[in-house]
Amino acid sequence: MTLTLERARAATGAAVYRPDRFPRELRIVTDTRAIKTGDTFLALHGERFDGHAFVAQAVERGAAAIVVENAQAIPDEVPALVVPDTKKAYMQCAGAVRDEMAARVVGITGSAGKTTTKHLLAQLLSAAYGSAAVLSTPANENNEIGVSKLLLAARPSHRAVVVEMGARHDGEIAELAAIARPHIGVLTNIGEAHLEIFGSRERLAETKWGLFAHGAQAVLSASDDESVHRASSLQTPPLWFGIAPSGAPGVWIPDRKTLTLSVERDPVLHVIDVRLPGEHNRANLAAALAAALLAGAELDLLVQAIPGLTLPPGRFESITIQDGPRLIYDAYNANLSGMIAALDAFAAEPAQRRIAVLASMAELGTQAPEMHERVGAKAAALHLDTLLVSGDFADSLIGGALSAGFPRERVVRYSCNDDAAQWIRAHTGPKDTVLLKGSRKYAMEEIVERLQQKATA
């Protein structure tokens, strides 16, 4: 899609300076380091930065036009759009591109699993259409800036656009859906993430439900009670997904070899080959398959792609340490449902001994102690060999484990990531497997780095 000056002006209501000098297409860039000759630099600003301070640098690097909030920031002879709010203008320009888009747009949100589901869906659609025909959110760019950047990158050759949407305040998903206006909306679940910010699960659910505010066909988890409760409010009945088949229209993966489809007729079974670890990832795959089918992908192509699917970095990532244990690094982030799912998957891993290194979870509000106790109790119920525990709620984790019968002598409290790495190096061997799980706040990748450094020293 081409964002012309006229479309940008109409979308933003901007004042235009030197319109005759604008490039034919406005390729909007917000980072001066990424500017190519002919781009249009948009000066975002926040609490700790102001893009207006880099306007001259952007022009020096080849920017052909700029978008700013203050006409005094315009260098001599440079064409410009002046808007009241550059971030809002960025989103409005993205919406203007979305208006011209022929691709099927899939929006994905949820308390857990949204990045994995996005990653799986992008791979499935790439198998169906070719990788060049699929555009998806990179890394964790799932806020208003990231969603706008993604849509502005869309081209007529794209057949599908997969948009991950995160929320840090009330109503944010509806704001993102207003830009992307997805045809299909996947809600992985409504869990406990960010309860400290939202205050209650009901408010969190209301925000997540904003995904469907612009008519997206819903793909919902049959095991999520909030989704089941709210489904009747949708204009169109949802397509469900999960592990255990039900009588509702949906996509189900009860085991690694079986796909059950009950979309428009009686359930039909297909033989598949799922190599992803954990029941929770079978649910994520079922969600991705449901979205891919609604987007028009052929089932046979999707089934053929399943054995080769991979997880995103930092999600149950297997790492072998020379002369040491196999690590499973799953510490991109952590909430209650994610911790429980990771522990379940870990307990099924082949190993002589299974050692779980658990840092605390974050942003759970007043329910944090009780949720950490539940994680500790889960670890005890799975009969893991040793627990290494740290973080703000280590006492609750340990208390939950001990109350559930975990032997006190097999609990190790570590003070920092260096301590954890030293313990692992001293007490484990090649036949052991170690899980690293906790909030990003605790930077558990440092444990991996320390072990890798010592292995190569």
Image (cartoon, grey):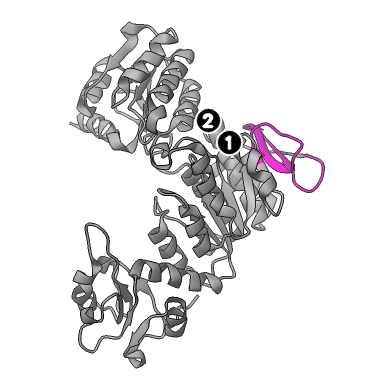
Q: Quadrant of residue 133?
A: bottom right
Residue at position x 30%, y 82% in the image: 64
Q: Which residues are magenta?
A: 241-267
In the image, residue 326 lies in the stretch drawn in magenta: no
Label 2: state its secondary structure.
Answer: loop
For this orientation, the residue located farthest to the bottom is 20
Residue at position x 37%, y 6% in the image: 407
Q: Is residue 457 left or right of residue 167?
A: left
Mark pair 1, 2: CA separation: 7 Å
From the viewer's side, name the closer residue of 149 and 128: 149
Give coordinates of residue 257: x percent, y percent. Answer: 65, 33
Whether residue 58 is visible: yes
Q: Amino acid at mark 2?
A: Gly
Label 1: state its secondary structure.
Answer: helix
Give coordinates of residue 248: x percent, y percent. Answer: 74, 40
Compared with 264, 86 (above or below) is below
For this orientation, the residue located farthest to the right is 266
Give coordinates of residue 430: x percent, y percent. Answer: 34, 20
Give coordinates of residue 337: x percent, y percent. Answer: 49, 31
- The quadrant of the picture occupied by the C terminus is top left
Residue at position x 26%, y 30% in the image: 447
Mark number displayed over residue 278: 2
Q: Is residue 256 left or right of residue 396?
A: right
Compared with 456, 285 (above or below) is below
Specify few, some or many for label 2: CA neighbours under 10 Å numbering under 14, 14-19, or 20 or more. Answer: some
Q: Amino acid at mark 1?
A: Arg
Q: Quadrant of residue 339?
A: top left
Q: Are marks 1 and 2 in contact (CB under 8 Å)?
A: yes
Mark number displayed over residue 282: 1
Q: Is residue 203 left or right of residue 451?
A: right
